Image: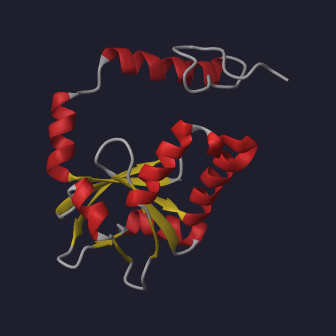
Amino acid sequence: MFRGSADARIDEKGRFKVPSKFRDILLKGFGPKVFLTSYGPPSMRLYPLAEWILIEDALRRNHWGDDPRVQQFLRTVDLYGDEQEIDPQGRVLIHSRLRKHTRMNGDVVVLGHPTSFLEIWNEDLLMQIQEKEPLGDETIRFVSGILREARHGNGTPPRPGDGPGGGGVPPG
């Protein structure tokens, strides 16, 4: 699992050096193969390839790939996506389309998420978004409800979309 943040840079050749606090976890837990992409906000996501394959498998199951929304998602992911390998110096090459879309040049911020991916942002852009859309009380209450339910409820946190303190998965 990844946690916290780290500063990094994209060099003049478009290479991103994975910060050591994340690189060790990534290489020891998943190996050097990664999938880089972007969808939603103009940030880059770096998935261990094994984790990305699980996402693809979930979308393939039960013919989700036939759904136009999933097709649109995959079209966007594939447009910006690229399978890469972390080199011996801990660097990953970011292809030009992905760099352009995510405004990746110079200083970047790497956010570790406990859902097994790294989110990489242009530092200036991330700070603008954080200033424009600060963490609000409603979001804090929502996340607090999830955590309370997980600790004091039936042990099963609510599923995404269930709403504050939502039902989650019924006990089996």
20 relative to 164, above or below: below
Q: Give the percent coordinates (x, y) of residue 85.
A: 47, 77
Residue 102 placement: quadrant: bottom left
Q: Tell me the colour scheme of the image.
A: secondary structure
Left or right of 27 on screen, residue 9: left
Nearer to the camera, 64 or 28: 64
- Is residue 56 visible in the rendered image? The answer is yes
Q: Give the percent coordinates (x, y) of residue 30.
A: 59, 67
Q: Give the percent coordinates (x, y) of residue 129.
A: 20, 36
In the picture, the quarter occupied by the C terminus is top right
Left or right of 149 on screen, residue 79: left
Nearer to the camera, 68 or 141: 68
- Is residue 2 visible in the rendered image? The answer is no
Q: Residue at x 47, y 43 (%)?
A: 72
Q: How many numbered tags mark residues here?
A: 0
80 relative to 124, above or below: below
64 relative to 161, above or below: below
Q: Residue at x 72, y 19 (%)?
A: 154
Left or right of 128 on screen, residue 67: right
Q: Residue at x 48, y 54 (%)?
A: 117
79 relative to 43, above or below: below
Residue 68 placement: quadrant: top right
Q: Residue furthest right?
A: 172
Q: Residue furthest bottom?
A: 88
Q: Give the percent coordinates (x, y) of residue 33.
A: 53, 73
Q: Residue at x 55, y 41 (%)?
A: 70
